Amino acid sequence: MIMDRIALILAIIGGLNWGSIGIFRFDFVAFAFGGQTSSVSRVIYTLVGLAALWCISLLFRERDPVDNEA
């Protein structure tokens, strides 16, 4: 599903940003979009948070069996 992929990409971006904050004390989103309080940064932070919530649903979904027919 396309929404799953978008959410996963946003969650990965958020995770990489948090990693850079933890390791280097550098917030890439704030740097790129004018600080933590800028409207664009806040929208990105919100989208990443919503994506993370969506990804929680991935943990509880049934997986379709993969057909291994050749």
Image (tube, rainbow, N blue to C red):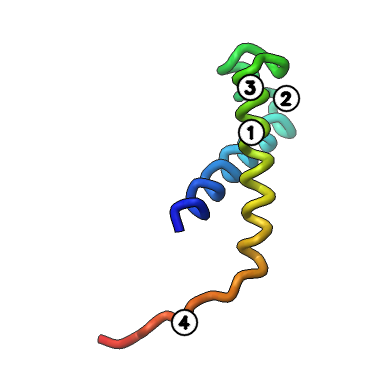
Query: Mark 2 vs mark 4: which is more N-terminal?
Result: 2
Q: State the residue position of label 1.
A: 17
Residue that carries the numbered disc 4 in the rendered image? 65
Query: Looking at the image, is mark 1 or mark 3 earlier in the sequence?
Result: 1
Residue 48 sits above or below residue 1 on the image: above
Q: Amino acid at mark 3?
A: Ser
Looking at the rendered structure, the kind of residue marked 2 is Arg
- Of the image marks 4 and 1, the number of the one nearer the N terminus: 1
**Which residue is found at the position 63% from the left and 38% from the top?**
48
Q: Is residue 32 left or right of residue 68?
A: right
Label located before the other in sequence (1 or 2):
1
Identify the mark nearer the N-term, 3 or 4: 3
Please name which of the two marks, 4 or 1, marks the residue nearer to the observer: 4
Q: Quadrant of residue 37?
A: top right
Mark 1: which amino acid? Asn
Question: Residue drawn at (71%, 18%), measured in percent from left and top?
Answer: 36
Mark 3 falls on what kind of element?
Answer: helix
Q: How far apart in space, not on screen, are marks 2 and 3 (Cα)?
A: 17 Å
Q: Which residue is denoted by mark 2 in the rendering?
A: 25
Q: Which mark is residue 41?
A: 3
Q: Among all residues in the image, which is located at the extreme left? A: 70
